[in-house]
Image (cartoon, grey):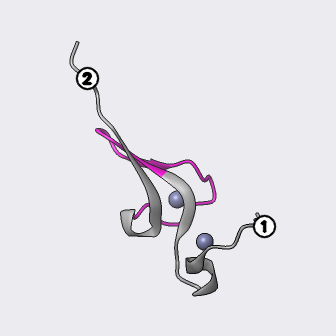
């Protein structure tokens, strides 16, 4: 997907992702289905989803 907004990491050709990394108790997933590597360092947006005890 080509975005009109350019980011500095894109200009620097740094391997990164524009999706949101969701860290769950059972694993890690990304909102970008084309995400190549689920590494926190590649994501500017990281959300921790923890289960709240009932
Ligand atoms: Zn970028
Ligand atoms: Zn990603």
Q: Is mark 2 within 8 Å of ligand 2?
A: no
- Secondary structure at badge 1 equals loop
Q: Is residue 24 left or right of residue 5?
A: left
Picture residue at 46% right of the left edge, 62% below the top: 44
Number of dots carrying numbers = 2
Picture residue at 46% right of the left edge, 63% below the top: 43
- Secondary structure at badge 2 equals loop
Picture residue at 52% right of the left edge, 71% below the top: 16
Say whether residue 19 is magenta: no
What quarter of the picture does the N terminus occupy? Answer: bottom right
What quarter of the picture does the C terminus occupy? Answer: top left
Q: Main secondary structure of the magenta part?
A: loop
Q: What residue range appears in magenta?
A: 21-39
Ligand 1, image quadrant it occupies:
bottom right
Q: Image quadrant of residue 50?
A: top left
Residue 23 position (above or below residue 49): below
Q: From the viewer's side, name the closer residue of 43 and 8.
A: 8
- Which numbered marker is on residue 52? 2
Q: Is mark 1 within 8 Å of ligand 1?
A: no
The 10 Å Cα crowd at callout 2, few under 14, some 14 to 19, many 20 or more, is few
Q: Residue furthest bottom?
A: 12
Q: Position of residue 53 (x, y in %)?
A: 21, 19
**Front disc: 2 or 1:** 1
Residue labelled with disc 1: 4
Residue 38 position (above or below residue 33): below
Measure how far apart labels 2 and 1 are at the Cα level.
38 Å
């Amino acid at each position: 997907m080509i975005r009109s907004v350019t980011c500095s990491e894109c200009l620097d050709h740094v391997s990164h992702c524009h999706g949101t990394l969701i860290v769950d108790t059972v694993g890690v997933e990304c909102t970008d289905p084309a995400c190549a590597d689920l590494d926190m360092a590649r994501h500017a947006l990281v959300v921790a989803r923890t289960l709240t005890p009932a």
